[in-house]
Image (cartoon, helix red, strand yellow):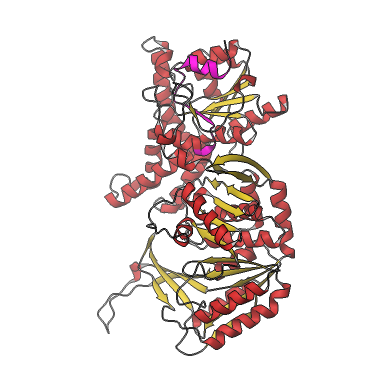
Amino acid sequence: MQKHDEVAGDRAVAAVALDSSRLEALLEQMPSAHVGVIGDFCLDVYWVLDLSRSERSVETGKTTQPVREQHYSLGGAGNVVANLAALRVGAISVFGAVGDDPFGHRLLRLLEACGADRNGMQVATGPAWQTLTYCKPYVGDEELPRIDMGNFNDLPDRLADAVLEALSAALDGLDVVIVNQQVLTGIHTPRLRQRLRALIRRRTDKVFVFDGRHYTDSYPEAWLKVNGHEALRLSGTERDPAELVMRDEALTAGRRLHRRFGRPVFVTRGDRGCLVVLDSGVYQVPGLEVIGRVDPVGAGDSFLAGLGAALAAGAAPQEAAAVGNFTAGVTVRKLRQTGTATPEEVLEIGREPRYAFEPELAEDPRRARHLGGSDIEIVADPPDATRAQIAIFDHDGTISTLRQGWETVMENMMIRAILGNRYDDAEETLYHKVVDRVRTFIDQTTGIQTLSQMQGLVSMVREFGIVPREEILDEFGYKTIYNEALMQKVRDRLARLERGELEVADFAIKNAVEWLHILHRHGLRLYLASGTDLDDVKAEARAMGYADLFEDRIFGAVGDVTVEAKRVVLDRILAEIGEVAGRVVTFGDGPVEIRETRRRGGLPIGVASDEVRRFGLNPAKRTRLIRAGAVVIVPDFSQLTALKRFFGFT
């Protein structure tokens, strides 16, 4: 496990980065673990309506709502179990209650399908208890008002006692017990809370992890998992759920809870990661950058399952939080379902995680710190730039603006591809839905290979379902259409450059070319990396007059979606010079080159350029680059004196 310290208030906070070998070892231990889950077991019901078959009821005169598809999945404590099973935890024992109704029987069958030991599940007869069920009708992508069951439950004392007796009898064989509290009318009655707390106090040899929505202070002897708003509320501060809980607030609340309960506290912060407060100090698990649409439903359960499974496998608390973070990072990508994560999926995301760094700073330019009197922003204490021997440059938006406006070209092309022959007559609601979807996708994927973006386009075309499946192109076909449209714009600009109507400075970020010459004169080896096709990158660099500065070290896309040009460059550098830390600096306006450089220990300098003016700061780029891991931000290269001083040039 790798970590480094950063200053946070009056104490150091250790940033946790779980390396892939340790992650793999923990995942391999999970089949030997035994986890118990006690809590509110729920059933999520998805009804996909197709109103094309609706008819008017003869008896009531009202129109029917025909269900084309129906899906059932475990929710609440059940979703924790589903995630544990997907992680291949060796043994899972469950303790709770269902009603003697069709939904309860379906829930028990789903638990059985997960391989869970159901001896601790009680079946309640009579009207006092209904299975906690949430029916979610959908028309297209729109969820209609939910139909809930179990809101009037009142668990009899005898069933509460039976649940706890089953848990107590099984406790010796359990490595970790997860306590889930989901609803006010669930199993956590005053009697059960009192007796469960007594059991937790008595069995100090066992780890109980509690995650609750309403009774968050009921089990103070358990390890506590809360989100930021719950941590504030437990600390005496109410906050509107729609308002953001800042890192410092979550940190202060987490410390207070740890002092109050004397147990480990996990404060989850969604895409901003997790804070872990222990006797040994405070640890921060960074959030994950997720490209594309997300569905956060059930992400908390996934985190809890990953946390519990890792603890049962022998992980330290901060390591277990990192596993939980990866697990949730997988499931939020699974839309319209309470998704689960397999060990292979967790390992895939954990091998090379896309961490989101410094989210508060990224979204609040008022916090920026600048290098004495300059526009150079210092995000984190950077390595010594005077030792740099190799400089990697992204091309488009970092040096050249020949492709400025590519987003508009791609947006128009993608909208036409999704709408197909309905482009001219699509109703306004549909048109704007497609536009919003495309713009969000382009914003989230800026900096990755064009071919990868076209793969995303294929998915969107299928998702909207307007174009017949047999007419949908593959990523190569869509890339050809996009590239031709973009290259027409680039060719027009190059022609004007060749005719002398415009100059190199008209298509370059301020002082970028001069900065290349300065670095070259000081002996740095220059590499040019781009997601654009290699032949086009070389031709544009020649036309701009700086290809010779890079010699044969120009890299671009080669038509293989599995190869990222910028990563190829970094791999070549690693092979040539070995140690990257302190020797490699990367300048780029996209997240890929910044993230990869930081991961390898180099110095990532984000160029938050305004490609229209060719100078000045682009706030959206600044945000994106800081989250990707930039430790320095420059808007352009206009302040050459400050840059030379930063690099130790005389």
Residue 603: which quarter of the image?
top right
* Residue at point 60%, 52% (across, down): 326
What x and y, as percent, mark residue 272?
Answer: 51, 48
In the displayed structure, does residue 406 sit left or right of residue 42?
Answer: left
Magenta stretch encompasses residue 113: no
Report the front residue among 133 and 522. 522
Q: Looking at the picture, does residue 517 appear above or below residue 315? A: above
Residue 644, visible in the rendered structure: yes
Magenta stretch encompasses residue 645: yes
What x and y, as percent, mark residue 275?
Answer: 56, 51
In the rendered image, the residue lying farthest to the left is: 61
Report the front residue among 397 and 283. 283
| Range of magenta residues | 627-648
Q: Looking at the picture, does residue 137 appear above or below residue 58? A: above
What x and y, as percent, mark residue 477?
Answer: 49, 39
* Residue at point 44%, 18% (across, down): 508
In the displayed structure, does residue 52 sit left or right of residue 31?
Answer: left
In the displayed structure, does residue 488 sit left or right of residue 1?
Answer: left
* Residue at point 57%, 18% (across, down): 647
* Residue at point 69%, 63% (across, down): 312
